[in-house]
Image (cartoon, rainbow, N blue to C red):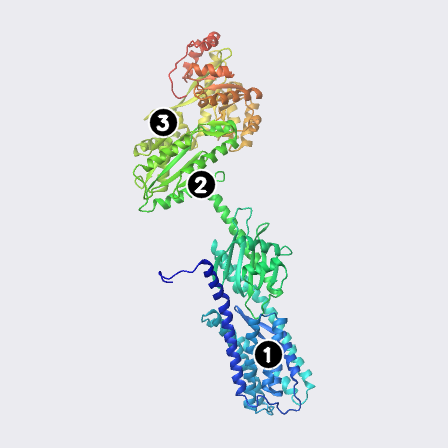
Amino acid sequence: MSPGAPSLPVASTQRVREVIGRTAPRLRVLIFAALLALLGGVLLLITPNATTMPHRVWTLPFFALVIAFGLAEATALHVEIRKESHSLSLSGIPLMFGVLHTAPVLVAAAYVLGAAPALLWIRHSDWVKTTWNSCLFFAEAAMAALIVHSLLASRLPDKAWEWLIPLGAILVAEMMSLLAVPLVIMAVDATFRPRLFADVGQSQVLAALAGTFTVTAVAVSANSPYMVVYSVLPVIGVGVVLQNSGHLAQRYRDLQKLHTFTRALTNERGPRTLDAGLIELAQIMRSRAAGLAVIANRHSRPPTLRVLTDSAFEDLEPEPIANLLLGLLAEGPVTQLTDDDDRHSAQELLRLLGARKLLAGRVYGDTDTVGVLFITDRLGMRSDFTPDELRLFGSLANTLGAKLSNENLVERLEVQARSDALTGLPNRLSFEIALAASAAEADQSGVVVMIDLDRFKEINDSLGHETGDRLLIEIARRLRSCARSNDVVARFGGDEFAIMLTRTASDGVGDFTRRVSDIHALLTSKVDLEGIRFEIGASMGVVQWPSQGRSTSGLLNRGDTAMYEAKRTQTGVVWYNPALDADTPRRLDLYMSSSAALENHQFFVHFQPKISLQDGRITGAEALVRWHHPAYGSVSPVEFVPLVVQAGLCGKLTRFMIQRAADAAVLFREAGIDVPIAVNLTPRDLLDPALPTDLAAIFAQADVALSSLQLEITEDSMVIDIETSIMVLNQLRVLGVKIAIDDFGTGYSSLQLLHRLPVDQLKIDKSFINRLTTDTSAAAIVRASVNLANELGLTTIAEGIEDYEELHIVAELGCQEIQGYIVSRPVPPLDFVRWALEWPADRVRDRIMTRNPPPIASRTSGSQ
């Protein structure tokens, strides 16, 4: 249509499609039929003695000829060619008898009057096909009569070679039929399709075979009508053999069709699978239209209805048609409907689809029905579907169902692989793919924001994972609300999120800065969960592309660097700059030199005391590792311990710490200080079955009781392999080792797991302690932790206390012990002995509660 041409309304367009798709092909068939009838009439006009009965020993009655043509057509052997079919019937027998024993006009009339009722009532052809075939039969009879009466002058053959004349007449008439069928198909489709003539030769051979038997029968009965019975029987027998052979050939073709259908589905994926399946289905079943109604299912796939009609696809409203199809399929997996079905639902369905006949079958998924496959209006010579075709259709529906189920499974797995199950957001993989695609565009720019939530673990562990999950879902909702259509929001795992902001044409210079600030403000606004209001907070690192790179891994690494800096400095948002990478060579150097540091005694141990709030006595000491690097000097444990773990040296470091604890226990015992020494274990230590044996050997060699040792584990250290960790802890407990849970409230343990652990003490993390004076929720968490420990028969120790206000609060909340800079900083073993011998335990309780500072080694703040 040219740009200026007027367009039709939707309803008119649909009507035009119907007129073109239905009326025009039928009209072309009727025109072709009229031409055949005209041809037959012309042939009869030029046939000698067309209305004269020949002089024979016996003549064939007209009614007998009509009955013979009807029986022959009712028992035809059907040969399918593409969407159309023609038949190899026994009609050659009455045709040859007719042209030799009766007038040509009567032969043509008997052929039409006998065959038409058989087509309508036995083979269930519609009136258009019946009209077309009747005209074709009329032309065949006229052609055969013309040849025989022109060459034999209305006499019977009296020489052997003359019997080739009626045989040739039958073959010419058959050839005319074989050529007319593909010609009318091309006329209907308005396309030139030479492949339709591929099977003409094979059909002509079969016709010659049948014609030879027919000539033999006619020759035998030429002088006696009673010989007809004996001569026709072999011909009928050959016909039966050919009929059975045709059925076997049809079964083989059905298998080929099923294979072709399966191969067509295998070669496609996604929406094209359905289209390819419908195209093959329409061709295999020779139907005018094919469609699939997909119903809503448990995987939340929306209902759809896709129909192929006259090589054009159309998506229709699924609900009424799908519901009617399912209702009519209640009695079985496959059903056939015709326009004479008196059920209202059947008539309504055929009306909606604009069809006269319909074949429908259920499409099964893994366990239930996922859709209904259907075809309408068979295009072959028969308008109804045979039992064999019904079985084939059921097999095709099952094959399509299996393919769709497999694709649904693959689709679900792909969605699961690329999305976060909890929040529904894309995961890291999807984010990286989207970032790589956007960053690769030359005219595109944007920023990547890496987000790590603050204090999430505290909420998650104190109020449970269900509350934590709801919090993550709420954060995901807020991030979605900030995103525009071309932005991507993802959850990387845990409490880590990322968002890619892409510049649009309307964005100004400062829009990214404003949007990042808005995101941070939204994330730091309070959240209401379980009737409690939380101020969650977030640390965000921002990196720009392409100015700071286009590589996906590079952008994510730089975003992480900025985010870690924001978390370290507690500034909320940090925009990446190259200066942040200054520590990267240092971290690599520390990582590479950590093994040599263990061998060269660069690691050493300091001890920090634990004090009872009940009587002020020293209740223990925690061994804390330190590293004095030759180039960097003192390195914080926060910096080097993760590097040691990454280097696979945690086992060596743990045994080093245990050895130093045993040495210190000997020193303390000699000074009269009998307190347990605590050593921290890493998650990997709890998976080491040799740890109890090695630990016992070290303390045995130092001649120190294992009751002098306390091992501290974190909640997170248990989640890798809970059963193995509990087994190792139980073995240590049997040896007399005391067990404490360190940093309680920051991990992922459950009450059930806590009940199974052989622990003696809970150490409340300093992140709660340091917020006691500013956050009422922190006090609630500490109180709950103390009450829980009391119920389980455990002691509680508050770690990281730095001022007397915190000390006063933890005492009121019921903590039994304290540890922190308010008492002493970590000191070398000999300094610890001197400090302990000077510690005034008899007066410390009163002096602490009156906020009169006791004699401590130092109150200088620093890392523990």
Residue 71 location, quadrant: bottom right
> Dot 3 surroundings within 10 Å: few (below 14), some, or many (20 or more)?
few
- Residue beneath label 2, please? 427
Residue 373 in sight here: yes
Q: Residue at x 54, y 88 (%)?
A: 47
Give me the residue at 58% from left, 66% from top.
Answer: 252
**Is residue 436 rendered to the left or right of residue 178?**
left
Which percent across, then down, holds residue 722?
54, 31
Nearer the observer, 267 or 378: 378
Q: Residue furthest right?
A: 226
User: Which residue is the site of mark 1?
Assistant: 112
- Viewer-closest of 678 and 317: 317
Dot 2: what SS? loop
- Across and down, in percent, residue 115 comes to 61, 76
Distance of label 3 from label 2 (alpha carbons) = 28 Å
Q: Secondary structure at mark 3?
A: helix
Q: Residue 714 location in percent, x, y?
A: 49, 26
Dot 1 lies on which element?
helix
Q: Amino acid at mark 1?
A: Val
Circle 3 residue: 569
Q: Residue furthest top?
A: 843
